[in-house]
Image (spheres, helix red, strand yellow):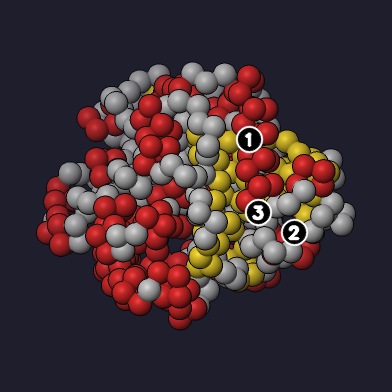
Amino acid sequence: MKKIVVVGSGFGGLSIASKLKAKKFDVTLIEKHKDLGGRARTFVHNDFKYDAGPTVITAPYLIDELFSAHGEKLSNYVNLLPVKPWYRFLFDSGDYIDYGDKLISTVHEIKAKYGNDKAKAYLKLLKHSKQIFKKGFIELSDEPFESIYSMLKHLPALIKIRFDRSVYQTVNKYLNNKNLNEALSMHPLLVGGNPYSTTSIYLLIQYLEWKWGVYYAEGGTGRIIDGLEKLLIKKDVNIKKNTEAKKIILKNNKVVGIDTPQGIIDCDIVVCNSDPTYTYNNLLDFKPKKASNRFNLKHSMSLFVLYFSTTKIYKDVKHHTIIFSKRHYELLNDIFNKKVFVSDPSLYLHRPGATDPSMIQNGNDTFYVLAPVPNNLSKIDWNDKGNKLAKIIIKNLQEKIMPELTKNISDMFFVTPDYFENELNTYAGSGFGIQPIFTQSAYFRYGNKAKEAEGLYFVGASTHPGAGVPGVISTAKVTEKLILKDYGTN
């Protein structure tokens, strides 16, 4: 029986551990921290529980597959609650759109505020998104791209859906309205991309949400992680927490083990859910063979995330509120390209109590608010700038959506790009690995199967098909296919 070590317990690591265990491999999962989840772990601060990372759950069948592979049901481990509406988009002008849950209500919302022509244009955009979804998600999301030639056969279809345009360019072609452009091109930011440079293939996310809906895990995203941990323990996966990979050991260019502070773990195969750039630089000490991965990779922006609770229940605040800054192109250019500190961030506010009453904790409302910021290639000193940005964000929320916020805060802390770099071991503190631009898509992303050593594989945001919960779980589907191709089933 082949022995496999999975490095890291984000959604990618947990997914591949479940899939390979179902195929009868001997699986050990190691995790640096005392808890599982990676970006999706749970923070507990002053008796309040907070989702650390992803809260938008789409394509839930992908999560269910991790349980059904073992004859289990997701619903026996965690309850997924539908979010209504999916998002409130709040613009600098004070106007807003409630988006999602029912298509007819969303179309009526656009029609009432921007006219019948824009409502019809949105439906045309959604139809285009469906075409991209059929190609980019249904056909290609779990297809291994082992060579450049494996991409070329899809080129005619990609040309037809205009992959060369950016998400923002495509939305503008249909809507041509500042507010609607900003709202309907926001999805790349959920996977680490700039709407002005991310390939329009990522418009598939828009239709994907309508296909399966948007959900929240009752009790927090951490309940999904807890459910997967219980499943893996039940199925005899060996889980080692507080165990950080220090080196991947090769012999004759073949994986033979992992070096950890607790000793060497012998194995035949290593699957890294760890950040690939970090892994090559620190665990392997050599560069990737693939030319597109060797130099000048563009890594995603990072995140500043402020977690807080309030004695006041802000019942009018929706579950997901996206607050757009007055600047749009200029702001994103500052974050992604110029990499300078921004004092007017756009914000994503998460209020789980709007969907899940159990997240009203100790009589308090609980939140996190996320601001895209430059990654640590910016050289911003977050020990100096962190408190400044936190005050800017609180002031912004108080003025736009949460009256008297300052005097109602009962608990608060934040994480900066330093958390992503130092705690999650991501290159330059990037929040989502490498950016989802075309020259870093499919074959041009980090390989799900490494070319440098036999028995070395990757899952996670920087591999194909990319970031986001559905994307990351799909990376495990790709990697599973490659391992089964190389080693068969046990």
Query: Callout 1: helix, strand or loop?
Result: helix
User: Is residue 381 positioned above or below 488 on the image?
Assistant: above
Between 202 and 27, the residue placed more toward the observer is: 202
Asked if disc 3 and disc 2 are in contact, CB closer than 8 Å, the reply is: yes
Residue at image coords 34%, 70%: 118
Tag 2 secondary structure: loop
Name the image quarter holding residue 74: bottom right
Q: Quadrant of the C terminus?
A: bottom left
Residue 25 can be seen in this image: no
Residue 401 got which mark? 3
Spot occupied by residue 60 in the image (x, y as percentages of width and height): 52, 66
Residue farthest to the bottom? 104
Residue at the disc numbered 1:
392
Q: State the residue in front, 47 or 176.
A: 176
The answer to whether residue 329 is visible is: yes
Q: Amino acid at mark 2?
A: Tyr
The residue pinned by badge 2 equals 314
Q: Earlier in the sequence, mark 3 or mark 2?
A: 2
Foreground tag (3 vs 2): 3
Question: Which of disc 3 and disc 1 is earlier in sequence?
Answer: 1
For residue 131, which numbered disc appears in the image?
none
Residue furthest to the front in view is: 93
CA distance separating discs 3 and 2: 9 Å
In the image, 483 versus 89, the foreground residue is 89
> How far from the left and from the top, in percent, is residue 27?
55, 46
Q: Could you tell me the amino acid type at mark 1?
A: Ile
Residue found at x 50% / y 31%:
342
Write the residue at 22% across / 51% down: 165
Categorize mark 2 by other alpha carbons within 10 Å: few (<14), some (14-19), many (20+): some
Between the residue at mark 1 and the residue at mark 3, the CA separation in whole angstroms equals 14 Å
